[in-house]
Image (cartoon, rainbow, N blue to C red):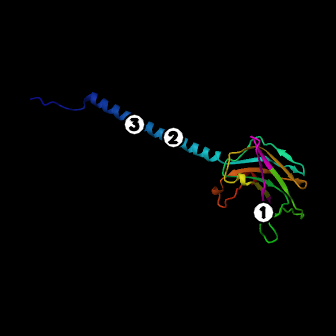
Amino acid sequence: MNIPHYGLGERGKRGCCERIMKLRLTLIIYFVTLIITAVVVGFLFNEHVISFQQELLVSSGMTLTTQWLELKPETPMKTAADWSELFIEVPGLVPLDEHGFPNKRLLLSDGALLRVEGYLTSDKGETVYLDDISVVGDNRKSYLDMSSKELEWKKRDYRFRSLTLRSNRVLVTGRIVWVSYDPRASKDGMAHPELLK
């Protein structure tokens, strides 16, 4: 009596190997796709974060007078994030009063009072006056911080093509930097522009 033998045989073994190879190939494709997707998502996330901040050197220095002077940077100044400000490096500006508190007046080291006025003009011809002015910095470097209520908590998407400034006396400035940032991203809620370091 012949008992049938139910082994895999050559054809069965070949089919099994082919299925294992296909499974391995599928797993490799799956993991490669997963890695590529993670890289792309990470890149897009970083691009998204970067695109919602802006730090721009408007001028490396200029001389302000009582006449209006217009600056037109090559790159527009954008309200890219929640808070936007203009920093002007002013040599000799006294940041603290005699009691060590932030100076409410714009006072120079020679005792003279300083007044700076400025406004931004958008690519649509809109004007935003920089009427919120304070002094920031320390005894080594001091800056005028110029902004407006319009530039706080990003009420609109602006693209400013020009900055116009004047002062009550001849004033040679240092760097002028535009910063648009999220105040919640820093410990003290203040901007710390890399361009001013």
**In terms of image quadrants, where is residue 6?**
top left
* For marks 1 and 2 on the same chain, the one whose residue lies earlier in the sequence: 2
* For marks 3 and 1 on the same chain, the one whose residue lies earlier in the sequence: 3
Horizontal and vertical percent position of residue 159: 72, 43
Residue 150, disc: none
Q: Residue extending furthest bottom?
A: 99
Q: Residues within 10 Å of mark 3 (few under 14, many from 20)?
A: few
Q: CA distance from mark 1 to mark 2?
A: 47 Å
Magenta stretch: residue 2 in it? no
Between 18 and 172, the one lying in front of the other is: 172
Can residue 30 be seen here? The reply is yes
Between 92 and 114, the one lying in front of the other is: 114
Residue 24, disc: 3
Q: Nearer the viewer, mark 3 or mark 1?
A: 1
- In the rendered image, which residue does mark 1 sit on? 138
Q: CA distance from mark 2 to mark 3?
A: 20 Å
| 173 shown above or below 123 | below
Q: Which residues are magenta?
A: 119-142
| 53 shown above or below 113 | above
Circle 2 SS class: helix
Residue 37, disc: 2
Residue found 77% across the figure and 68% down from its top: 101
Q: Residues within 10 Å of mark 1 (few under 14, many from 20)?
A: few
Q: Amino acid under label 3?
A: Arg
